[in-house]
């Protein structure tokens, strides 16, 4: 029996691993194993899995009566290079968190909830502040957190907070956690085997009539699981991944060997030409299977008008298909991405509520259904978007890191919107920056994935960040300004 891996994981090469260890050796040279923490989240499912059992000969469909479901609960685990396992951090899929869901769990464990049940940047920030930092600040010297580069793990505020406590982040190469992450390599598999045994015993006993694991019963089961975890598995994972002690060959040995050794050349010269041809062809086949294909450009989605009750043919799609119009940064001029091209569709703007969350990033344009703004480039200019209402400040010189209010035009130059933008770097006749969006319920702004060029003539005013203030962790990836923005209709 073999295990399937994605082509992206199979494409991890010796060069990628070597470059990773070149940097890793600079950071972790002479660092104590107690100062190195590997963190990763996983899910504990409600299915105890299949088992080999004894049945009467000729039974075609062996079954056993045991309730199970596809539900799962996310848990963040972390461990140090010397085998010390930190308290777990649990995230439920729910709108609210109740006291009974936190009773009877492992000592010092933490609990949270999100709408999706997965970790978002808020939960990760809370994990860093409540578990990682309290554990690491007791140690002297520089400490390191090693993990994958998920979007929820990349936060400037968290990195700055860790720098204050002399903690540094190290992110693993993309698609390489099956080789470079200690918890994935040697810790999670035995842990999940133990979880299946604990879950099966519970389902045969106290939980035999439960359709799934109730959230108020999960902390007790998690406590039993934590008591079975072994520090030797953690140390084995760090050793197998070449982190403690530092040894890149541990990882390189898990990759297919490069066919360039003198021994292989000697053996190939002793073979007949026919055997050599078959051998080289077979090697090329294996190489093509392992290497990932070249990335394909995604085709634009097309909106098709259909008539209810009428059957469709291919020609109907070709005639009625309409290419969706570009979004706010969809225009291209001389190979440069311009800020403009307002969408004519409904754009969903996120609203921060107690239960807001997402799978990939905390805030994105398509994330929330609670606040929808109809945008149309043909509409009349709204309050604060007319040219006479604002005064450009294009004569000023701006630097990377400055926050500006800029105009983003639609199809017509008579209608524009005002957005907050952070300058990334200047260009000949303008700047390239990252755009921010306003939270409708607050005066705070959160970054988007939109990075585009804007002209110096489109700059309205310069903003000044407000002083650092204590706020809920839910708003820690958002910013506010000292300026009075009541006269500007910012999006």
Image: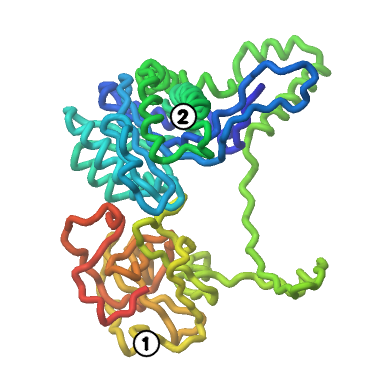
Residue occupied by mark 2: 206
Badges 2 and 1: C-beta atoms under 8 Å apart?
no
Instruction: Please identify the quarter of the rendering in which residue 9 is found.
Output: top right
Residue 384, image x, y percentages: 33, 84
| Picture residue at 38% right of the left edge, 71% below the top | 429
In this rendering, is residue 199 above or below 175?
Answer: above
Q: Nearer the viewer, residue 14 or 2?
A: 2
Of 192 and 33, the residue lying toward us:
192
Circle number at residue 386? 1
Q: Secondary structure at mark 2?
A: loop
Residue 196 visible to the viewer: no
Q: Residue at x 53, y 39 (%)?
A: 211
Q: Is residue 31 above or below residue 171?
A: above
Q: Say left or right for 340 vs 474.
A: right
Q: Residue at x 17, y 57 (%)?
A: 468
Image coordinates for residue 364, horizontal then vertical, percent: 44, 60
């Amino acid at each position: 029996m073999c295990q399937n891996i994605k082509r992206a994981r199979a494409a991890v090469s010796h060069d990628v691993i070597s470059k990773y260890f070149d940097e890793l050796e600079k950071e972790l040279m002479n660092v104590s194993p107690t100062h190195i923490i590997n963190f990763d989240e996983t899910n504990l499912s409600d299915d105890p899995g299949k088992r080999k059992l004894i049945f009467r000969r000729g039974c075609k469909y062996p079954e056993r009566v045991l309730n199970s479901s596809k539900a799962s609960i996310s848990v963040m685990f972390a461990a140090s290079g010397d085998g010390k396992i930190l308290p777990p951090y649990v995230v439920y899929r729910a709108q609210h968190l109740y006291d009974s869901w936190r009773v009877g769990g492992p000592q010092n464990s933490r609990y949270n909830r999100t709408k999706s049940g997965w970790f978002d940047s808020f939960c990760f920030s809370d994990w860093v502040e409540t578990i990682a930092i309290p554990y690491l600040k007791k140690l002297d010297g520089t400490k390191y957190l090693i993990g994958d580069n998920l979007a929820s793990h990349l936060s400037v505020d968290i990195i700055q907070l860790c720098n204050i406590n002399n903690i540094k982040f190290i992110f693993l190469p993309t698609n390489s956690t099956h080789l470079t992450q200690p918890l994935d390599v040697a810790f999670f598999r035995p842990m999940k085997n133990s979880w299946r045994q604990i879950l099966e015993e519970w389902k045969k006993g106290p939980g035999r009539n439960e359709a799934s694991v109730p959230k108020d019963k999960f902390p007790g089961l998690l406590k039993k699981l934590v008591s079975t975890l072994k520090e030797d598995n953690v140390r084995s994972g760090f050793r197998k991944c070449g982190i403690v002690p530092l040894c890149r060959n541990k990882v390189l040995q898990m990759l297919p060997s490069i066919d360039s050794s003198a021994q292989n050349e000697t053996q190939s010269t002793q073979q007949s030409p026919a055997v050599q041809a078959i051998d080289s062809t077979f090697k090329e086949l294996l190489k093509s299977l392992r290497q990932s294909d070249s990335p394909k450009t995604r085709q634009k989605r097309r909106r098709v008008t259909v008539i209810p009750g009428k059957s469709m043919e291919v020609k109907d799609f070709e005639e009625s298909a309409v290419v969706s119009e570009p979004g706010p940064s969809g225009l291209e001029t001389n190979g440069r991405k311009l800020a403009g091209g307002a969408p004519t569709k409904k754009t969903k703007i996120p609203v921060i509520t107690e239960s807001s969350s997402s799978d990939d990033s905390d805030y994105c344009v398509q994330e929330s259904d609670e606040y929808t703004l109809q945008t149309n480039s043909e509409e009349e200019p709204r309050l604060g978007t007319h040219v006479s209402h604002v005064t450009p400040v294009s004569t000023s010189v701006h630097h990377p890191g400055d926050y500006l209010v800029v105009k983003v035009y639609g199809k017509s130059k008579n209608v524009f919107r005002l957005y907050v933008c952070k300058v990334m770097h200047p260009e000949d006749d303008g700047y390239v920056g990252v755009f921010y969006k306003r939270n409708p319920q607050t005066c705070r702004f959160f970054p988007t994935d939109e990075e585009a060029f804007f002209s110096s003539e489109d700059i309205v005013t310069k903003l000044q960040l407000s002083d650092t203030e204590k706020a809920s962790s839910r708003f820690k990836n958002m910013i506010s300004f000292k300026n009075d923005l009541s006269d500007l209709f910012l999006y």
